[in-house]
Amino acid sequence: EDKVVQSPLSLVVHEGDTVTLNCSYEVTNFRSLLWYKQEKKAPTFLFMLTSSGIEKKSGRLSSILDKKELFSILNITATQTGDSAVYLCAGLRQNYGGSQGNLIFGKGTKLSVKP
Amino acid sequence: DADVTQTPRNRITKTGKRIMLECSQTKGHDRMYWYRQDPGLGLRLIYYSFDVKDINKGEISDGYSVSRQAQAKFSLSLESAIPNQTALYFCATSAPLDGETQYFGPGTRLLVL
């Protein structure tokens, strides 16, 4: 059975701290791993990782994928209160024949950044 | 204007009632999805559609049905609502040429009494 497991489930830090969020996956016909940020609304896209070992960066956020060990991490440096959200990790499964399959989501990590 | 819209945004209904949630998109994407989100369980896929003639069950399709009326419209129906279908429902779209990223609607909060 496909599954995506995120850890920790919740995390409380202070502004300026650096955090690392973890995501491990077991996804049949794995194609890519996606990270989303969800505040009190719909998830918004952060990163899609397809190749192992290539770091993607966007401002203070960065992420990397290890396809051998089946995990990804999301790093946030110099955290701000606006980073408080649930961070969702999802594995993209590719259907037979090469067409896109569907996303398998983890339960999310709830990050709270205190002033 | 939002690319993916959902109606209604909030709905309260009673057990046994039929209810339809609608999703429309202006992104021109072929692929559309319905998810439900429950506290502590994350996002779970209900149904997905890769084009107008294609409908696929997700991991929790029991108690739900869908209709892909057009490329831009994908509706989710609860034929006879039950309280454990109380949840936040999201519609999403994607396209291979757009990196297969899924774009989410704002969500519909459903309460079944």
Image (tube, rainbow, N blue to C red):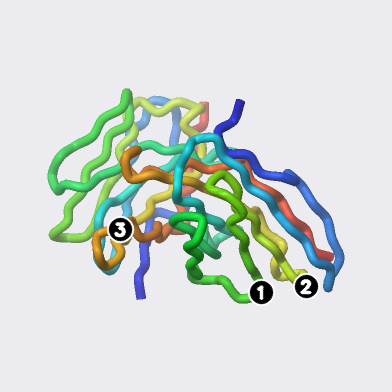
Badge 3 crowding class, 10 Å Cα cut-off, few under 14, some 14 to 19, many 20 or more, is few
Q: Position of residue A34 (x, y in %)?
A: 34, 47
Q: Contact, CB < 8 Å: mark 3 with mark 1? A: no
Helix, strand or loop under label 2: loop
**Residue drawn 55% across and 64% down?**
B46
Q: To which residue does mark 2 refer?
A: B80
Q: Contact, CB < 8 Å: mark 1 with mark 2? A: yes
**Residue drawn 33% across and 45% down?**
B96
Q: Position of residue B45 (x, y in %)?
A: 51, 62
What is the distance, in whole Å, between disc 3 and disc 1 at their CAs?
27 Å
For the question of whether residue A12 can be seen, the reply is: no
Return the chain for callout 2: B
Q: Which residue type does callout 1 highlight?
A: Gly
Q: Are marks 1 and 2 on the same chain?
A: yes
Q: Position of residue A43 (x, y in %)?
A: 51, 42
Q: Give the image quarter of residue B68.
A: bottom right
Which of the two discs, 3 and 1, sits closer to the camera? 3
Question: Compared to B53, does B3 lie above or below?
Answer: above
Q: To which residue does mark 3 refer?
A: A99
Q: To which residue does mark 1 refer?
A: B63
Badge 1 crowding class, 10 Å Cα cut-off, few under 14, some 14 to 19, many 20 or more, is few
Q: Which residue type does callout 2 highlight?
A: Ser
Q: Give the image quarter of residue A63.
A: top left
Pick whichever of labels 1 and 2 is earlier in the sequence.
1
Q: Position of residue A57 (x, y in %)?
A: 26, 30
Return the chain for callout 3: A
**Is A80 displayed left or right of A28 in the figure?**
right
Q: Quadrant of the N terminus of chain B?
A: top right
Which of the two discs, 3 and 2, sits closer to the camera? 3
